[in-house]
Amino acid sequence: MQVYKFGGASVSDAQGIRNISNIIKACTATPLLIVISAMGKVTNQLERLCESYINNESDQHDLLEEIKAFHFSIAHELFADQQHPVFNDIANAFVEIEWLLEEEASDAPDYIYDQIVSIGELVSSKILTAHLNLSDCKALWIDARNYIKTDNTYKEAKVDWLKTEADIQKTLPALLAKSVIVTQGFIGSTSENFTTTLGRDGSDYSAAIFSACLSANSLTIWKDVPGVLNADPKWFEQTEKIPQLSYHDAIELTYYGANVIHPKTIKPLQNRNIPLYVRSFLNPSLEGTDITAERTKNPVPSFIFKVNQVLISIFPKDYSFIIEENLSDIFSILHQHKVKVNTMLNSAISFSVSIDHNPNQINALIDQLSGSYKVKYNTGLELVTIRYYNQDTIDRVTADKTILLEVKSRHTCQIVMKNT
Ligand SMILES: Nc1ncnc2c1ncn2[C@@H]1O[C@H](COP(=O)(O)OP(=O)(O)O)[C@@H](O)[C@H]1O
Ligand SMILES: N[C@@H](CC(=O)OP(=O)(O)O)C(=O)O
């Protein structure tokens, strides 16, 4: 059986839904399970609505109406019959938010976030299922929350693999034998059936969870790029497609920030030896990137850029060495502030980390570190990671830059730099 995952970029309008319906209908390798994300930038809009509700701002209802209007206008384009049940399905999904907005926002913000933001995937999956059925492709909508079971870490829920696998295996194989199944990425539920989300961009991960639990023959993730490229085309004019990647290289690239695939996606697939194909929904007949256990043949240098970095350098006040005890203290402080370290380096009496610039988080972190250490920091920096680097690639990315930190392993080089 196969799993296909379609992200927001593939369904940003009615034509997008028609296009992915055609891709699904052209799939001859059944059974097939489809995982779909919210349409276009709907998750961002729902996040904004959530913020407005929590802060009791005046634009809550306008924001909701805008999101509803977007979906209804797409549905009107796709379904000529204005009595089609999909219109009720869309309205019912938004009723959940309307009820919430009627009450004061007294629950924990992360809990509220998951109840509101999850609606994007519920609506897109209803629209796609209805469209497939209308275009003579029998499809069954299922609620991912009945299968992806998580803890109650709202906004970043952790999957309960044992429960998830048992629930998926109990019912889905029989249903898959009868028709295509359409479900949602990104969402799950706690043991008490409260909705959770798996973290932004988590639909790729959902697709990997379904693939692993169903022992799928493959997972295909359909993107607006021809496959995994050696750099983000939004940053680089000249990129090349990487036709084949090992799980190892894919996990390294995504970990360092190649956000074409969510970093958590690879592990469940690698653990069950399930190939991941990254293909273009714009050119579905083209081959994309195959990610498998096989070693990457002819690896090419790949570039991952992160801007808006802060380099924090930490020095023990008494000139003691940076050894295990200090490192463990520093890491525990970083962990308390939920900081994700993008790169790090230590010397005899200093330890430096590059992290994303989130002003509230950084100020609190520096305050706490300053209790025990001397702390210096630089803002407005860039971090470039080069996988399979050579001197020529380093020279190219650092031309006209001042290097503040450089870390090299056998295959990966990370440079924190600023404009000179
Ligand atoms: N190495 C890379 N190769 C291809 N695309 C990349 C790479 N790094 C970043 N991207 C970006 O990932 C985007 C696709 O991912 P994303 O926007 O999350 O898709 P979706 O939301 O549809 O799942 C591309 O448009 C591209 O800008
Ligand atoms: N809709 C969610 C989940 C997701 O993964 O979306 P996409 O597949 O469009 O990146 C988000 O935007 O975070």
Image (cartoon, rainbow, N blue to C red):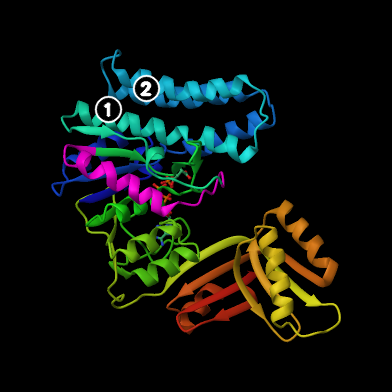
Q: In the rendered structure, which segment of residues is drawn in magenta?
A: 153-180
Residue 229 screen position, x and y as percent: 37, 63
Residue 194 screen position, x and y as percent: 51, 36
Residue at the outermost left position: 28
Asked if residue 292 is positioned above or below residue 394 in the image, the reply reads: above
Name the kind of residue labelled 1 in the image: Ala
User: Is residue 175 shown in magenta?
Assistant: yes
Please, what secondary structure does the residue beneath circle 1 have? helix
Residue at the (61%, 24%) spot, across then down? 60
Asked if residue 204 is positioned above or below residue 418 in the image, the reply reads: above
Q: CA distance from mark 2 to mark 1?
A: 10 Å
- Ligand 1's quadrant is bottom left
> 315 or 380: nearer the eye?
315
Q: Residue 51 lies in what quarter of the image?
A: top right
Tag of residue 89: 2
> 376 or 331: nearer the eye?
331
Residue at the (36%, 26%) spot, across then down? 74
Residue at the (61%, 62%) spot, across then down? 340
Residue 348 screen position, x and y as percent: 73, 87
Q: Residue 161 lies in what quarter of the image?
A: bottom left
Image-based side of 179 in relation to 195, left or right: left
Q: Is mark 2 within 8 Å of ligand 2?
A: no
Please, what secondary structure does the residue beneath circle 2 have? helix
Query: Does the CB distance between marks 2 and 1 fall below 8 Å?
Result: yes
Name the kind of residue labelled 2 in the image: Asp
